[in-house]
Amino acid sequence: MLLIVVADESHQTSSSSSSLSDLIKSRRSVRSFIPNMRVPHQSIEDIITMGIWAPSAMNKQPTRFHVEEDQSILSRISSSIVGDPHGLFYDAPAVIFVFTENAIEGIEDVDCGLAVQNMILEAHRIGLGTTVIGWSRQAPELIVKELNTPVSWHYCIAIALGQPNETPIKTRTPPIIHWHSTTNSQSQEHEKHEL
């Protein structure tokens, strides 16, 4: 028997649904920020708040955040990791470093990633640009030392944040999906056409 469950969307509007879709599709990583334009602290708090509303394994809510605006500290970290004081964080006026604490072992990065996705979408919604700094994971001990974070915090990733000074337009390639149907017990790989 094939059971099809249809979600009750009576409480949703088509406009809110399309707005989320548009938000997701229009967000791009920004690597150029308007110089000397600080991000309001309330905006940063709002972005982090959206992060903590992400799901987490067993609802541990393990994400922790350090906001760094001191350019000398950011330059030192950047120089140590990529050999260029401006090369890692793109001179963003603020960088949110994301950590976890007391997370389910082996799931830390998943919890972190879910929170980060919420955060970069919220930043985009309010007109700010972000890029997720994966290279920062090359030196977690250095980052912990420079930021002087609690020893129980485990480093995950950083988000460069600021007023965008560019408008990236790169699109996405169609997804590659492996479908398995119980009706014909065959597996096929399809390239789904872009909507």
Image (spheres, helix red, strand yellow):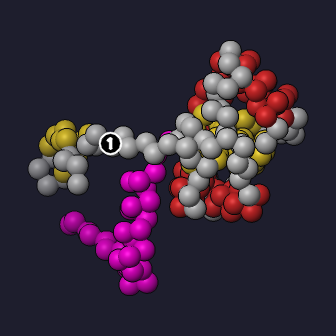
* Identity of the residue drawn at 67% across and 26% down: 86
List the single residue furthest toward the left: 184
* Identity of the residue drawn at 38% across and 84% down: 10
- Residue matched to label 1: 172
Image position of 168 with respect to 86: above or below: below
Is any atom of residue 113 visible in this view?
Answer: no
Question: Which sits in the foreground, 12 or 163?
Answer: 163
Image position of 135 with respect to 109: above or below: above
List the single residue furthest toward the bottom: 10
Q: Quadrant of the N terminus?
A: bottom left
- Counting from the top left corner in percent of width and height, residue 28 is at 46, 45
Q: Quadrant of the C terminus?
A: bottom left
Instruction: Please give the range of residues in magenta.
Output: 1-29
Residue 172 as seen in the image, left or right of residue 104:
left
Amino acid type at mark 1: Arg
Q: Quadrant of residue 101?
A: top right
Circle count: 1
Residue 48 colored magenta?
A: no
Q: Secondary structure at mark 1?
A: loop
Residue 192 as seen in the image, left or right of residue 133:
left
Q: Quadrant of residue 20?
A: bottom left
Residue 13 colored magenta?
A: yes
* Identity of the residue drawn at 39% across and 61% down: 22
Question: Which sits in the foreground, 174 or 108?
Answer: 174
Is any atom of residue 129 visible in this view?
Answer: yes
Question: Which sits in the foreground, 65 or 76?
Answer: 76
List the single residue furthest toward the top: 83
* Identity of the residue drawn at 76% across and 31% down: 74
Q: Residues within 10 Å of mark 1 (few under 14, many from 20)?
A: few
- Counting from the top left corner in percent of width and height, residue 97 is at 72, 41
- Counting from the top left corner in percent of width and height, residue 81 is at 69, 19
